[in-house]
Amino acid sequence: MKEYIQGKAYVVGDNIDTDQIIPANYLVYSLSDPDERKYYGRYALSSVPEKEAGLPKGNIPFVKAGKDSSEFSIIIAGKNFGCGSSREHAPVALQIAGVEAVIAESYARIFYRNSVDGGFFIPFETPIRLIDQIATGDELRLDISSATLLNISSGKEYKLKSLGEIYGILEAGDIFEYARRSGLIKAG
Amino acid sequence: MGKTMVEKIIGKHAGKEVVAGELAIVDVDLAYVQDWTGPLAISQIREMGFKELKRPERVAIFIDHSSPSSAKEIATSHIGLREFARNTGCKLFDVGSGVCHVIVAEKLARPWDLIIGADSHTCMGGAFGALATGMGSTDVAVAIAFGKTWLKVPAAVKVEVKGKLQKGVYAKDLMLYLIGKIGADGASYKSLEFVGETTENLPMHERLVLTNMAIEAGAKCGIFPSDIKTKAYLAEYGREGDYKEIAPDPDAVYERKIEIDASMLEPIIAFPHTVDNVRAISHPDCADVSIDQIYIGTCTNGRFEDLKVAADILKGRHVKEGTRLVITPGSKDIYQKAMRAGLLDIFVEAGGAVNSPGCGACPGAQTGILGDGEKCLSTMNRNFKGRMGNPNSFIYLASPAVCAISAITGKITDPRRFI
């Protein structure tokens, strides 16, 4: 696992649900077909209401028209990120779009579990409401092992909640690799 | 120290005593997927190298979300699901069977079961006194392959409801009220345990509404003690032998208690675009909300009794010009009962469109996708932006009675004067 993640912030509000992350009409695309897989990146976060897309200003699309990935690699979110459907396509879509970390005040449990199991990105929790302090486009540097976030644009530093028990799974890559390494599944 | 129902069920499946907050590896009694989450689960099972399932008779695949198929890509993924069922001997409920959770209630869920489904509304099975919870495809793939999963034992919230629901007020209104009160993340990671005289008196089809929507408050599960009503429902489906008793200990430890007086509740409407954005129907915001489409059905409110409530209101009346009425029964059994009881005739006579059983318009891929700027009033459980296939549309949630009367008036209407 990387020690640091550096990239631009994309800021959204509370209760971002899985229909906003990847609308159901795009679930027809196959995740195992490389040509179709890219659509998950193209349409990631495409259903967030325009005014709330890329706070504080809004009206900033997560993925620019015609692109299959985003210029933003760290999502800053409010409460209950990923609520709604159990679709694993939601965290996968964020990964395909280029997201490396999400920092939210809290997560919906199925989405959180899916994110960790698949190792799609690192889901951090923040004890303070970062969506009021970080603006879309700010350059961020995330130190993973110490769980600290530096906003390079403003110079402010924030302490995030430790990853705790999930660190091992994320370090292994996903739940299967973790299970192999810890002897739960026989290798081979 | 006394135990909650989830502590009891997880303890039984872990083979040890557990308390809230503890992690446990548990045996799974039933694991299931639907046609949107199934293909990924199956590819994970293949990747793990599994060809045989431990207990294929307790694994089920449901083709319900895009059913009959609505696109060639979907139709092709359905082929893979059918092949998997043929090769492994697991149960397959194909086109025409109905919504996974509704069928699980009719045929598979039992008190004391531990049920995992790759769909967030799996929590509905908790109405039987089971621990039923939704997970992602990968987690369910592990449960299908190994017959086991891991869980954190959730802290429990005791929901104690007293007082009699007024005529025209239903479990749907009670649940929308509760979600409005505690918020869309008000029970995150927790178990909602329903006790008290009101919920004890609720028939199974109404208990299922409460557990179905537990996820809309972020809960891991919703659960009822089993009793004579559970037994009667199981008997109705020829499963009396599946009955077992479960109840929380009198001194069970709850993290929080919520008390509700049901007698003061009015019909409740959830406004776009979150389920906790609720108003009582007498609120001025509910006056003059014109509706383009009414959708009655889904795992939440697509049972026979729901259709009966709607039909009793629609009988001899006609849907307002400019408003559409779409009805999708929850299962084949419900469809046939409704047909035999003459309900489908009433719907069609009133100007409604009746679909074959399944998820219908709810997940936004077929039979009732909304147009730009349109408003839909539905018995569904979720009104997220874009849920019904168009982010430029607006979804309101309510009981079958509110939906039926509103179909006649063309705007959100209080059903109490018409019942």
Image: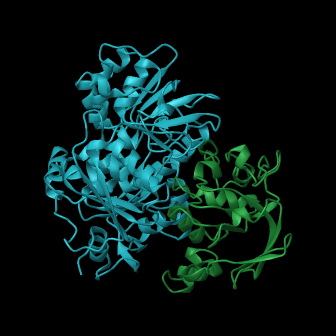
Chain colours: A green, B cyan
Q: Position of residue B257 (x, y in %)?
A: 33, 64
Does B252 sit above or below residue A97?
A: below
Nearest the eye: B166 or A59 = B166
Which quadrant would residue B245 be assigned to in this image? bottom left
Q: Nearer the viewer, residue B159 or B108?
A: B159
* Residue B100 seen in the current view: no
* Residue at screen point 59% across, 28% down: B374
List the single residue furthest toward the right: A153
Q: Is residue B417 left or right of residue B271?
A: left
- State the residue in front, B37 or B196: B196
Taking the image as shown, residue A149 lies to the left or right of residue A29, namely: right
User: x, y percentage for residue B117?
Assistant: 42, 58
Q: How many marks?
A: 0
In this rendering, is residue B10 above or below A28?
below
The reply to whether residue A77 is visible in this rendering is yes
Give the quadrant of residue B87.
bottom left
User: Image height check: is B311 above or below A124?
Assistant: above
> Where is the C terminus of chain B found, in terms of image quarters?
top left
Locate the N terminus of chain B and report the quarter of the image it occupies: bottom left
- Residue B2 spot, x, y in % from top left: 23, 77
Q: Nearer the viewer, residue B153 or A24?
A: B153
* Residue A111, position as x, y percentages in the image: 55, 62
| Rendered residue at 44%/42% (across/down) | B64
Q: Residue at x 35, y 20 (%)?
A: B347
